[in-house]
Image (cartoon, coloured by chain):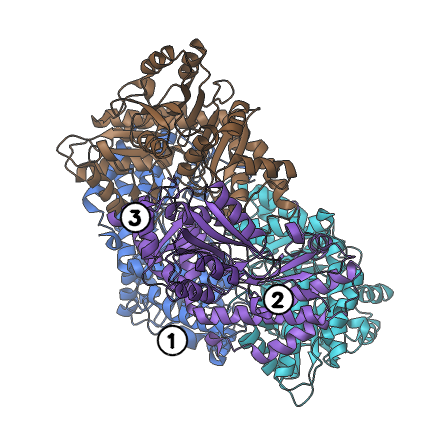
Chain colours: A brown, B blue, C cyan, D purple
């Protein structure tokens, strides 16, 4: 017996790990296999082809590391850069901050551009730095596509435009942990050199795969990058890709089959439809927040995230109490405010394999929690606002028409 | 791939089969076993003891038939009655009607008491019949505790009172398919002679177990009952109970382990808490129906069902379209109106392993469907009414305090 | 924790329930669904078509009863016969005996032809009875295709030949519980009127489906058969087949998806290959029994069963002790001797989703158990004999060549 | 459908990943959870305590990295050593070779002691080096407890004895990937400073956890070790242990529950009984190899591995063909010969949740494969030898007596 038993489903609305669809749970419900038999390389080959589609790349090379997003970060950095290399990196919230921390600890010379939490990356600052860098001392620009802590999405197309404007050869490394497979992401079109995500986010799998995709330029860079690396080294993978056996060490059989099932679901729904669904659920959430009279932590609409909404609570309320109460009374799991916004925001994750009525159940729950903690919310107001929008925008389910 | 794929969870609100909790799915995720090994009798022994608790009986004898509710009905009748026996039976909706149909086809002399659909069994008529039956020609009173088609709960305590008043020896046979484990049911206190339920209802298992419980008086009756029966014969079970091997034919190993897990969850929550939760969810649903300006099919509060609410739609709307649209657009499964109320009502099942936010998601979905089909519902109104009630009444989750 | 825990896999070699392949476990690992949605009728339609293939019938009508083999028997009898009808039935072991017991209890006039256990049905006696029945008082011939208790397979082609020889119109009702999907069975070619099996046998599913297939002649007979029946009545099913909703009462969602997966595996392997595999495993088992110096309970090769081998132990040994010890020391589940052969035989089931090395592990286990109980077996002898045969006869796995 | 379908169970006898018991599959069959809720820290706390038992340490600090054994190696090295540090390391087969390769690539000054493949680590060489190192330039001794490629177990007690003899302060780092939980391993008694294993080996889980345990001395060393590390840094874990939240980044919920179930099974059987079972299965395997007239790759009995046996094939046979054929004809997965012994040995893994009859099925399969490839094995000979031993040595299953 799980010691925290509560009747009914847990309402999982943290911005990852997210709900796993039954089809994926089924696919992973299996014994181990010999990963050196012909079956696993054949499966892997298919996965590597399929996974490129979610990055929107044809020229990239994907790697399926048995790790988390943090490990995927490390792989992106150590394979393309050498100690002491200058990189420009943005802090706009907890996860970009943690990545910068990693960058520093790995010995890079990090040129940090910080923004107020709730704002996007300061791309003007980027432009200035690139403009001033005729010598091309900047080896890479590192940016989080979607900052999970504040619900801020950076505009990668603009980043590319700026790089192009200054004809700057810096690598563009992108953390797409809470974006890829949910937000519009275009690796090739935007000239992203390394992009990465984690299995427990929009792919709706368990934690355990750090999926990294490298452009040809990044692969080239990896040949000379001097950062020490073994576990996260692309070279070993590339060697085994050549051999057709694919794995320098043991993969998780279950996650490979799970990834196959997860990708199949995404392709069946259609990647563009998946992205549209995330936009719809996010719009509904934002309308509810407005109706409650609360503020979105994200300061401008251009940065609104379609995978997570950070909601600012009045100063007399501790947002941690909201999260605690959600879990203790309603079996509702919301995201805590982290670091600078601890106690000040709570987060609603609306990413992954999720639908409208699940979200509405969550919104109703949030309303009751708000009331519980003394915020004078009008019960039903957020749900009403969300429904008014959704009822006009939900498409028929194609397989059921 | 399931051909009717839709993203996110299916919102299953038919009044059975209901949502299966993960703990139960896990318990059933197993290979077959030899049911003649010592393990299965030991498990069965435990189950037979545990299952008595959900009937609130200490003197009853339970049977776990590999069948459905329809088979459980047949077992109740053929083991206690002989062809031609007079029985009093009530039609108040589709399921009581089907049971009466079975009673007739099995050769009993059925004295049918019919009520308008939406009303409870006519117990005055019962009283009259018993009063007039000094000769005790009535061998059994058959009654459905909760009519799933109309959301009507009959008052079994009153039935017993009437039988006692006339000191009538008729057996009391009760269909508890959509009541037991969800509504207050007291086999011993109410002198029920045979009670039965199905695994896919409040127990939240897959279909496949017809659980029948017989009083000592019913067991006695089975010794002389002349109805032909083999598969459903209690005698074979009782013989194998004596032998300590328990099974006259092969049981479903998976359902036995599943039943163990399901009962463990119920006992962990506490049966009285489970019943209170059903009452709470039902109250919330009824408040939403009121807020929508719609009528409950159940005509009086005394008959309100805590496991299913049948909602009457305006005459210009086809309730089947509501169900169809729920499924095709919102991945919401509602219950159809059946037979006399086809097209006139749709049903919200709120039974089994379910919680408040799940229900609120459903209610929000119903609101959007109502709007879709042209009913001028105020979006959010039902959810608001339900939340106002629930926020005052949901207890903290004991394991998480 | 299961209280009978032992490390490693249980070696399940009872002649049912048998091992469930992972693919089927996966398919069943799912929540309930509304069986009135369009998805379940669509699935059912496919299943009813597919299931006819394992009966080798194009004209038959299949029924998927939520029941066991015992229920399927009852359905076959009560739908085609009237009380008092004369039927010829054969007792050759425990399961045919139980069926005859059921036939008697259901009120038929059973003309029993008994054989020594270990011999096939006495078809000469059948011929005599048919010859003597110019008046066609015999309404049905009931025969078990494969007697699971003794490992005896009856020759159904011969039964048909005899019926044809006497141009006798009796219905031919066949228990195929431990044969269909494993032994050569030809419903149309052999003029079988009702055939039936159970899901936990060669289909390798959990218990819970009694699969019955009726010829047009049997369907005709059902229109006039006067045996009382409701749960097992084909009429209700046929009515719902017409309506396209298929189910007169709630099916097990999980078993339907499981059946789909099980049939897919059988068709992928090829039904003829499945049958050939059963023959190969059975030959290997019989060679091992010979090598051990033990006798097959089946008295002549013409009756050898390819799904179960009943092994006769020397009179100084109690076969129950062999079964007990297999389970208690080796995690090996063998079949007990039943009734007349209790203590005298133990049974090795070799049916369902099973392969050669699994069987060899079992045979090695049996050798050690035999030694344990004092039988002077030469360890390795049975495995050696089986391997010598198998190594010459196992085909390459087509999907892996 | 898996494209390499074959009927029956796959016989998985590679030395990892190994068979997952059903209890563990069940425990992992679950949705994601918020890892920041109180439930996951509470579970983690229990796991960290329990996992120390399999290392036989009370003073060690365990880390559950979401990685593989290769990552666990990296964690052991980078947390305790600085670039340029001299370490003594042994190459005795492919996995020790790969570890040395990693050590070199991570910038350590590796003093390699190589042995012929099939022999244990040259501990005399170790003694010499330590004797010559009065200046204590050797910072660590790195040794693989059980070399999976050749089936060689090194004597760690002797390693400790030598270190003590020279009162040498070098850290002792042990790869216990294919030993811990299967072979006798005593972290505290043998003064091991870092020990590590992977979830897919003796713990019988999916791949995905690299379990590392550090002695107080290793923890001290980590405070000054200058190797760059972030993902694998103990410091981050220790910080979160202090906070009581335990996780610096997202763990796999499923593997945590799976680990709980796996440890529960091990403790239920008893760790000493688990170790004894491995010894028994290994003895049986070695007896079979002898009976086949083949040589164990391990050159002396003192080095025999109880988790994997590498079998040398005659020079006219390609051992890869044996592995290929096992998979293609018998659904048997054996281990390939790697690197220097490629084509020369095949490997039988006999570790994890496995029992005697499973092994005997494998041995019978190997015999047939050997015959297939032209080796004149006497069929049944290996099984006979193994059975003769096992029948005398298998204990009764405690839970079933």
Task: Please provide percent x and percent y for residue C167.
Answer: 84, 63
* Residue reaching furthest to the right: C165
User: Quick check: C123 left or right of A162?
Assistant: right
Residue sitting at 61 percent across and 83 percent down? C372
Query: On residue D238, which mark appears?
Result: 3
How far across and down, in percent of the image, does residue B326 sit?
A: 43, 34
- Element class at badge 1: helix
Give coordinates of residue D365: x percent, y percent. Answer: 70, 63
Q: Secondary structure at mark 3?
A: helix
Which residue is disc 2 drawn over? D359
Q: Secondary structure at mark 2?
A: helix
* Residue B204 seen by the camera: no
Numbered mark located on residue B216 in the image: 1
Q: Residue at x 19, y 41 (%)?
A: A321
The chain letter for the residue carrying disc 1 is B
| First-in-chain label (3 vs 2) | 3
The N terminus of chain B - image quarter: top right
* Label pair 2/1, CB-CB below 8 angstroms: no
Subunit ID for the residue under disc 2: D
């Amino acid at each position: 017996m799980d010691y925290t038993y509560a009747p009914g489903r847990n309402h999982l609305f943290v911005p990852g790990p997210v709900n796993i669809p039954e089809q994926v749970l089924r696919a992973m419900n299996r014994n181990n296999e010999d990963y050196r038999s012909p079956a696993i390389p054949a499966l892997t080959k298919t996965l590597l082809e399929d996974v490129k589609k979610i990055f929107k790349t044809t020229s990239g090379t994907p790697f399926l590391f048995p790790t988390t997003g943090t490990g995927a970060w490390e792989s992106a950095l150590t394979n393309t850069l050498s100690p002491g290399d200058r990189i420009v990196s943005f802090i706009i919230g907890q996860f970009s901050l943690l990545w910068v921390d990693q960058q520093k600890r790995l010995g890079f010379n990090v040129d940090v551009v910080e923004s107020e939490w709730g704002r996007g990356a300061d791309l003007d600052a980027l432009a200035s730095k690139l403009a001033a860098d005729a010598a091309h001392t900047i080896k890479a620009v590192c940016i989080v596509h979607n900052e999970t802590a504040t619900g801020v999405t950076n505009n990668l197309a603009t980043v590319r435009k700026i790089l192009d404007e200054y004809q700057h050869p810096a690598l563009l490394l992108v953390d797409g942990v809470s974006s890829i497979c949910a937000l519009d992401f275009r690796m090739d079109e935007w000239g992203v050199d390394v992009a990465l995500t984690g299995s427990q986010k929009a792919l709706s799998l368990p934690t355990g795969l750090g999926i990294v995709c490298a452009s040809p330029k990044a692969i080239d860079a990896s040949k000379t990058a001097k950062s020490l690396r073994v576990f996260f080294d692309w070279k070993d993978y590339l060697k085994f890709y050549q051999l057709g056996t694919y794995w320098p060490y043991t993969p998780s059989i279950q996650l490979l089959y799970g990834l196959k099932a997860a990708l199949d679901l995404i392709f069946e729904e259609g990647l563009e439809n998946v992205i549209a669904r995330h936009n719809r659920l996010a719009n509904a959430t934002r309308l509810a927040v407005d109706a409650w009279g609360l503020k979105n932590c994200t300061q401008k609409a251009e940065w609104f995230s379609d995978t997570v909404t950070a909601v600012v609570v009045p100063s007399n309320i501790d947002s941690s109490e909201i999260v605690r109460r959600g879990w203790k009374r309603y079996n509702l799991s919301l995201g805590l405010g982290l670091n600078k916004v601890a106690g000040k925001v709570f987060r609603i994750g609306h990413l992954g394999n999720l639908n409208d009525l699940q979200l509405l159940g969550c919104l109703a729950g949030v309303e009751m929690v708000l009331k519980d903690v003394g915020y004078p919310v009008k019960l039903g107001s957020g749900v009403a606002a969300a429904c008014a929008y959704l009822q006009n925008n939900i498409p028929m389910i194609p397989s059921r028409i």
